[in-house]
Image (tube, rainbow, N blue to C red):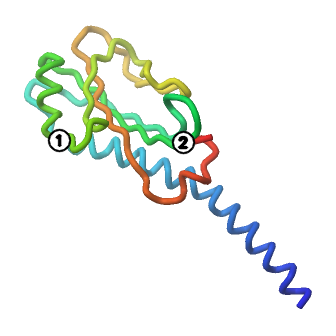
């Protein structure tokens, strides 16, 4: 009986630790998948893929909560309006396939993390296309980056 009483708490502690270790891995894979989905979209004419980035954690806003961000950097001869119209065809929600001008390597609207492209951006023909991903699992509760 004494062996059972010491084994049960050990199992509970190990289970919680396994969630704490697995949560960042699972959450990062959601963000990476979000970026990969953008990379899989066909590029519009006169547009070149440059690179992609992704990040998980509490990235914008206040309070607690995991956020999953994926983005691609493109260089295009098309206007911002033309790119927005093009990517709107692939968006199922308002937080998918968002297109904005990208003036430098830093992704300025990410408040709580340093996230930047590696590419040096020169000129006014660079754009970021980004989406916010979702993760319906419980792993967001065990990732301290969301708190």
Q: Secondary structure at mark 1?
A: loop
Q: Secondary structure at mark 2?
A: loop
From the viewer's perspective, tell me whether residue 135 is left or right of residue 44.
right
Residue at x-position 28% and y-position 21%: 100
**Residue 88, x across and y down, in percent:** 16, 34
**Residue 113, x across and y down, in percent:** 54, 28
**Front-most of residues 144 and 37:** 144
**Residue 58, x across and y down, in percent:** 54, 36
Marks 1 and 2 sit apart, C-alpha to C-alpha, by: 26 Å
Residue at x-position 25% and y-position 41%: 93
**Front-most of residues 1 and 73:** 1
Toward which corner of the image does residue 35 lie, by quadrant? Answer: top left
- Establish if 38 lies above or below 59: below
- Establish if 115 lies above or below 141: above
Q: Quadrant of the N terminus?
A: bottom right
Q: Which residue is mark 2?
A: 65
Toward which corner of the image does residue 119 lie, by quadrant? Answer: top left
Residue at x-position 49% and y-position 29%: 60
From the viewer's perspective, tell me whether residue 129 is left or right of residue 48.
right
From the viewer's perspective, tell me whether residue 8 is left or right of residue 71.
right
Q: Which residue is mark 1?
A: 90
- Establish if 138 lies above or below 79: below
Residue at x-position 74% and y-position 74%: 11
Q: Are marks 1 and 2 in contact (CB under 8 Å)?
A: no
| Sooner in the amino-acid sequence: mark 1 or mark 2 | 2
**Front-most of residues 147 and 13:** 147
């Amino acid at each position: 009986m004494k062996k059972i009483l010491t084994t049960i708490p050990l199992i509970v502690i190990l289970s919680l630790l396994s969630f704490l270790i697995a949560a960042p891995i699972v959450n990062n894979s959601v963000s990476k998948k979000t970026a990969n989905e953008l990379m899989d979209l066909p590029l519009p004419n006169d547009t070149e893929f440059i690179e992609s980035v992704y990040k998980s954690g509490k990235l914008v806003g206040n309070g607690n909560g995991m956020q999953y961000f994926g983005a691609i950097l493109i260089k295009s001869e098309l206007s911002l309006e033309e790119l927005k119209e093009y990517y709107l065809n692939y968006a199922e929600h308002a937080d998918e396939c968002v297109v904005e001008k990208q003036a430098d390597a830093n992704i300025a609207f990410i408040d709580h993390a340093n996230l930047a492209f590696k590419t040096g951006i020169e000129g006014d023909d660079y754009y970021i296309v980004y989406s916010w991903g979702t993760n319906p699992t419980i792993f967001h509760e065990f990732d301290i980056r969301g708190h």
